[in-house]
Image (cartoon, rainbow, N blue to C red):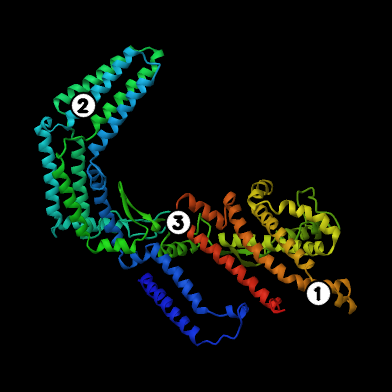
Amino acid sequence: MITAFLTFIFFFAIVGCILYGRKLIKTEKVDAVFGNPERAQGGTHWVIVGSSFLLLVWLYYSWDIAKSFFPKSANELCQVAKVDESLLSLKYLFPIEERQFKSTSVIEIETENLNKIVLDIEKSSKVNNQNKQTLFNFVKKTKSTIPLLTNNKLLENDTKEQIDLLTGKINNLTKNFIKKDFPEESAADERKRIEAAKEEGEWGASSTSIDNAVEIPYIPKTKKGLKFQAAADELNSISDEFFELRNHNSQYTSLIESIKKDIKEFRSKLDTSEEITSSFAKDILKIARRIEYASIFPPNTLNDMQTSIIDFDKAQKKEQGGLRWVDIFLFPSGTIMSSGPSCTEQGSGRWLPKPSDTLNKFTLMLNPNVGFKQIPLIWYEMMDISKVIGFILPNWIADIMPGDYPVHNEQGEIKSNFKSKVLSFVTGDFNLLKIPVPTGHIWDSFLRVLLGLVFGIIVGVPLGLFMGLNRFAKGFFDPLIELYRPVPPLAWAPLVISVLGIDNLGKVFLLFMVSLSIMIISARAGASGTQLSKIHAAHSLGASRWQILRHVIFPNSLPEILTGIRVATGMCWGTLVAAEFLAGTTGIGFVENVAKKYFQYEVIWITIFIMGMLGLLFDITIRKIIDKTIPWRGKG
C-alpha cells in the first residue's frame, strides 16, 4: 500500500511541478543576462521533478509497482511460465515458433553432413581405394535409412495409435482447461495448498535473515495459478510419452543394426596406421545414431498434433486474461521464467531490487543485533574514556618522566611509583567513566576517508603553497609528486596493503596518498595564480612576508584548495571501496564485496546508496564551507 501511495505521489508531483514551472516561466521577470550565475539559482520544483522521476523509474523497472498493485501476479506468471516451459519441448518439433519441422531440419542437416564426409573421403590421400569404397557404402546405407522413416506406408499401426492418443489427450486438456472448475480440487487439498503457500512466503519478501529471501513463490496461491500448474503437469506427462515414442519399423531396425555391426567390425580390423579411416567410419556412425534418436516421422503424420498444440496455446493465452496485460505493461524488460523446480525474475526486476525489499533489508541491517556479518551498519558501543586517552597520548611521555620504572622486591611484590602511574595513564590501563563511541561498517569507512583526507590537507596544502612560492621546493618536490600522481590508486593498493597490513593503517595511508597529490596541485596552482598587482600593493603598504602569505596569497588560493578538497573527497571514496574490496573485514566496500559473491542485489544497492549519501554529505559540507569562506568567488 505504501508503494502504491508513493507511486501516485511521485506521478502527481512530476505533473504538478512541470505545470508550475511552465507557469513560472511565463510570469517571472528575469533581468539577469545569459551567463549570470543567478539565473541558475532556485528551481526547487525542478529538483522535485528530477527526484520523483528517478524514483518512479526505479519503482517501475524494479517491478515494485507490479508487486504493489498486483501482489499475486508473479506467482500466477510463474504457473504460466510452467505451461510455456512444458509447451516449449513440443513446439520445438513443429513449425510453430520455428521455420520448419524438426524432422525436416534433422534430415537436411544430416544429409549435408554425410555429403561433406563423402567429399572429405574423396580428397583424403591417407585412405586407400578399398576402404574408400567401404566408407561410401556405409554413407549410402545411412542415407537409405531416412526413407524408411519418412515413408507413410511403413509407419506401424501402434505408432499411429499412440500419436492419435496423445493428440486426443491434448484436445481433451484444451476442453477441460477452459472450464471454470478445472482442475477439481477437494477442500482438504485446497487447505493443504494454501498452508504450503503461506509457509513458502510472499513475492520478494525479506526474511529475518540477511542471506535468505523468497524470490518467486512456486506453489500456486490462486485458482488461476492452480489451473495453469495442473495444465503444465499434464503437458509434461504428454511430452514425456511423446519423446519416448520412436518411428522404428522392422525394416529400419534391421538396417540400422546392420550398419552399426558392419562399422564396428570394419573399425576393429583397421591397424594404427589407418586412424583417419577409422575416424571417418566413427563420424558416419555418429550421424546414423543421431538419425536414430531423432523424432522423424512421415510428412503430415503430426499435423493433427500440431493443430491441437496450437489450439491449446491459444486457449491458455486467452485464459490468462488481464494477466497478459499486467505482464506486458508492469513487467518491463523481462518476465517470470520457470526452470525446473523454481521460478525466477528474468530482466530488470532481477538485478534492480525493489525499493520496498531494499528498504526492508536496509532496516534489517540497521538492527544492531543483525547487522552484516555480525557487525552493525552504524551503532555505538560504550567505551571507557581511558581507552580514548590511551589512543591519543603517545607512550613515550612516560619514558621521559624522571626516575625508573618499579622493580619487584624479594616477596615478588611490585609497588607502583609516579613513572608507572604515568605509563598506566598514557596507555589507558585504568578505569574511569564510559562514553558512547560510534562503530559499524559505515563509521569505519567514514573515519578512513576523513582521516586520509585530513592528513592529505595538513601535509599537501602547506607543501603546495611552498612549491608555488619557492623555486627550490618546486624543483625538488615536483618530480616526486608527478612520478606517483599519474599512477592509479588501485596500482598502489596491493603494495600499500601488503606492507602496512589490511587494518586501518594501510587503507588510511592509501587515501592519504590519493588526497595528497590533489591538494598539492590545487594549493600550488592557487599560490602561483595570485595576481601580482595584489602582492605589489601589499608590499607598498609595508606588509611582511607572513602577512602577504596570510592575507593575500592564502585567500587567493582558497578557491583552488577548496575545489581540490571536493575532488579529493570523491577520489578517496572510490579508492576506499576498492581497498576494502581487496582486503578488509569491515566497511562499505567489504559489505558490497561479500554481497556480490552471494548475488545479494538488495545489499549491493544499499551500499551504493550509502556511499552516495556519505559522499553527498561530504560535498554539501564543503560547499557550505566554500560559501562561508570565499563568498566573493565569481563576483570579482
Q: Nearer the viewer, mark 1 or mark 2?
A: 2
- Residue located at (29% from left, 53% from top): 218
Q: Earlier in the sequence, mark 3 or mark 2?
A: 2
Q: Which mark is residue 26?
A: none
Residue pointed to by mark 3: 601
Image quadrant occupied by the N terminus? bottom left
Image location (x, y in percent) of residue 368: 50, 62
> What secondary structure is found at the residue carrying circle 2?
helix
* Left or right, 573 with reference to 5: right
Q: Earlier in the sequence, mark 1 or mark 2?
A: 2
Image quadrant occupied by the C terminus? bottom right
User: How far apart are the two marked residues, 1 and 2, measured between alpha carbons?
Assistant: 98 Å
> What secondary structure is found at the residue carrying circle 1?
helix
Query: Does residue 418 sit above or below 110 in this rendering?
Result: below
User: How far apart are the two marked residues, 3 and 2, measured between alpha carbons?
Assistant: 54 Å
Nearest to the observer: residue 361 or residue 390: 361
Residue pointed to by mark 2: 145
Nearest to the observer: residue 364 or residue 291: 291
Amino acid on which the number 1 mark rests in the picture: Val
Residue pointed to by mark 1: 552
Q: Nearer the viewer, mark 1 or mark 3?
A: 1
Label 2: how many Cα within 10 Å (few below 14, some 14–19, many 20+): some
* Left or right, 377 with reference to 458: left
Amino acid on which the number 3 mark rests in the picture: Tyr
- Residue located at (61% from left, 52% from top): 579
Quarter assignment of residue 152: top left
Quarter assignment of residue 389: bottom right
Image location (x, y in percent) of residue 61: 40, 62
Would residue 175 be visible to someone looking at this image? yes
User: How far apart are the two marked residues, 1 and 3, measured between alpha carbons?
Assistant: 52 Å
Q: Quick check: marks 1 and 3 in contact, CB under 8 Å?
A: no
